[in-house]
Amino acid sequence: MFSRFMLFSIALSVQALAQSSTSVVCVAGQCLQGLSNITLGAKLAIQGVPVSIQLLPGQYTSTTNPQLLHNFLTHSSASYSPSAGFGNSTSLPSLPLNLVLEPGLAIYSDILYSGQEGFSQLPSTPSNNSFAPLTAGSLAISNNLWVVVSTDSKDRIVLWDAIPDISQLPAAASSRSLSLLDMQSSACSPFCAGAGICTASGTCTCLPGFTGATCESCASGFFGSTCQQCPSDCAKCDDGISGSGRCLQPLVANAPSTCNCLNGECGSNGQCTCNAGWTTADNGTACAKCLPGFFLTSTGDCQVCQVGCTQCADGTGACTSCKKGFTSDLNDKTKCNFPQGSTSTGQLCPPDSFSDGTLCNSCSTSCKTCSGPSSSDCILCAEGSYLLNGKCVSADSNGVCEGSGLIADNNKHECDACGAKCTSLYRLSARICSLKRPMC
């Protein structure tokens, strides 16, 4: 970044600034005679020592000479103050120290990198037709970076290296009143197009709507030389850098295809509402598999597993997992049975009671048979009610279980989805089917 000419310019200025300066300027292997007001790099100071050292960018180790510089670098209590753009550490980093300007532009109010300092970081995203006023006496540019500035007369100047004195630029730019138009890394090959910016990592970051390795193309859904977005009411338009933006496929609000919904209905809000017993499949398709506790029948319905069964096989309904305390029925693989309770003397309990290990106790009035004392312990519900999620619920005059879209099944004694076994059907709503009496 810093050429021999730049270091020579600093050396020539040291004597002239000696009367009002406080720092000796050093690079690895050399300290310039005299004192200077330069703030580029970082300052080293030791309490009680009347002189400080201004480190210019470079690499410094524990063996770096001359002796004065070596003493400061290895002093245990030396303070370290980097200028803008050289990090924010407040203590001397461990050696070796690689003092380098971060990706961006260091700005100094006076010539030879002195006076009030500032730093403009290399942007990570491109901007459209933006500029920033730039008042400076000198500029330092980080490695592999180029900067574009404009003058009062709108001339554009590309800077590739540090400028120790703005007056060295063409006469039109020597007023110190410039505008920063662009700043990019030179690490990208090929260079980014106008809609992109080259980052320090060597990749192009594009403006919204642009894409490609150099931001040379429009992303899908964008068109024209400025990559405008296709109309909002258009599902597909003539896109691309040479596209016209003409709508090729209008957007249909709440189209059924937008729901990706099989066994359900697409609402006006575009959301799919599943039929009873169905849920979203593992691949994301809505209403494409049976809920846990239901199985897929040969007719394509989702029906509830038998009482006591928590999971059953598609096609046959054979129980693959019984509820705790239940065992598989040896004669009917679709069923799980709860063992009949008995007293401590071996007497079997009646169907409407359960055993506490010693005596038989009556079931809740909600239950026909049970495994415990509460209404949530029902194995079969009392006449006129049906199992739903472990509780007994009633059915309305249409055979629909209370608080659900399921129907009351008198054979299973539980609430089930409306399936092929129901022959006398009518629609209660767009997604609920039920029966005229008698129930299934």
Image (tube, grey):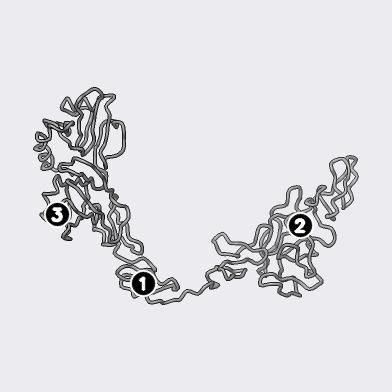
The residue shown at (89%, 50%) is: 350
> Looking at the picture, does residue 288 appear above or below residue 95?
below
Identity, as a three-letter code, of the amino acid under mark 3:
Ala
Q: Which mark is residue 202?
A: none
Between the C-alphas of marks 2 and 3, the distance is 89 Å
Residue named by callout 3: 173
Residue 200 x/y as whole percent: 28, 49
Q: Which of marks 2 and 3 is nearer the N terminus?
A: 3
318, 25: nearer the viewer:
25
Between the C-alphas of marks 1 and 3, the distance is 42 Å
Identity, as a three-letter code, of the amino acid under mark 1:
Asp
Identity, as a three-letter code, of the amino acid under mark 2:
Val
Residue named by callout 2: 307
Residue named by callout 1: 239
Q: Earlier in the sequence, mark 1 or mark 3?
A: 3
Label 3 crowd (10 A; few <14 / some 14-19 / many >=20): many
Residue 375 x/y as whole percent: 80, 52
Residue 54 x/y as whole percent: 20, 33
Confirm or deny contact between disc 1 and disc 2 (CB under 8 A).
no
- Residue 30 visible here: no
Label 2 crowd (10 A; few <14 / some 14-19 / many >=20): many
The residue shown at (22%, 32%) is: 60
Closer to viewer: mark 1 or mark 2: 1
